[in-house]
Amino acid sequence: MVVIVALTVLGTGIFVSVRPWQLAASATSTPVWFSYDRAHQVEYWEERIRALGANVAYSKLISEVPDTVSEHEKAHVFGGALYAVAGLSGIGTCDYHFLYGCFHEIISKAIAEQGLAGISQVENECRKTGGLAGCQHGIGHTLVYYHGYTLEGLTKSLSDCDTSMRPHPYEGCYAGVFMEFSMRRMLGDGGQIRPVVHNDYVYPCADLDSKYQAACMYHQVRWWHSIISPSPDRITQLGELCSGLPFGDRVRLACFGGLGVVVVDLADHDKTATLAALCDSAGGGAAERLACRSIAAGFLFANMHHETDEALGACQGLQGSAQNYCVNYATDRMQFFDPMPLPQEYGGVF
């Protein structure tokens, strides 16, 4: 996108081509590039990366964009620009901000060019930077895009996670696979959310091998959150869906753990709500509420600037072993992407 600016110098009309972001910004707190379509946002960041260097440009992105779940797509935009400038080596600039969106975009572009043979190269590059978990998540997205948005494609993608890497039980490659299957972000335009078919809110989890069902339901909650109309009782509806699952305790608790990820987003949009209150309002028993609160604490700590005080809010009011369990997540002694069994008095599974 080019803007033609006319200047009059000594009576002569001089026309100068400039990019829209080279014009003086209006007095607004919102960066001007927010209003561009995706292609021109990528072009904007390509110019900034070339002018400032990748790390400085990424710092500017972090300073200009709220680090919330809903801004994940803007990190995808930056990742696309970074790949255009630096190729796969640009992945060293990416980090946990914006739910690893920068990682996701670079990896998807690399594998789109190289095919599945590129997975090992991506992992090697990620190991150099210490960002392996974020890279594996991006690989998961790309596998579904590569194999297709069908039950067969989903099964092949999960199998590739198992074959090519040691996946985390709930995050990493599995997370990318399940997120892409339902949210379809790689199809462009911010994603094309999978519709509900035959009023089946459990599909595809019941059709998968039992070893994948807990991870599937952990991520299914985010899909439910996207397709259920916003309302004051939406969190209760999500809790009822988890409680009514046709699986055993481990899968049900994994669902409530996934709900903990969702409440972080809900609390981010409603500053009057607390993580503890949202998890408790979802219903379920003490074990379900503890799973929700603990994963919320760990997810908030890991993805929202490592704010321990905010994460500890999810543990408010808990006592004894439940408090210790939750606090371990809030202080990063246990990680949300690799949850430990609940205390024995809460059933000991998860």
Image (cartoon, helix red, strand yellow):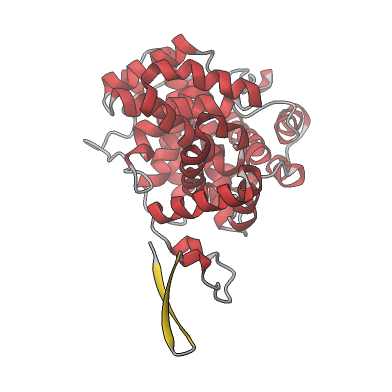
Q: Which residue is farthest left?
A: 198
Residue 130 position in % (x across, y down): 66, 25
Q: Nearer the viewer, residue 302 or 134?
A: 134
- Numbered marks: total: 0
Tell me: 161 left or right of 195: right
Taking the spot 33% from the left edge, 17% from the top edge, the residue there is: 155
Q: Is residue 36 above or below residue 9?
A: above
> Quarter of the image holding residue 193?
top left
> Quarter of the image holding residue 231?
bottom left
Q: Nearer the viewer, residue 146 or 279?
A: 146
Q: Is residue 236 above or below residue 254?
A: below
Tell me: 67 left or right of 116: right
Quarter occupied by the C terminus? top right
Residue 229 position in % (x across, y down): 37, 53
Residue 217 appears in the picture as rendered: no
Quarter occupied by the N terminus? bottom left
Residue 100 position in % (x across, y down): 55, 37
> Quarter of the image holding residue 133?
top right
Q: Is residue 275 above or below residue 321?
A: below
Residue 40 position in % (x across, y down): 41, 56
Taking the spot 27% from the left edge, 41% from the top edge, the residue there is: 195
Residue 71 appears in the picture as rendered: yes
Q: Is residue 136 above or below residue 42?
A: above
Q: Which residue is farthest top?
A: 163
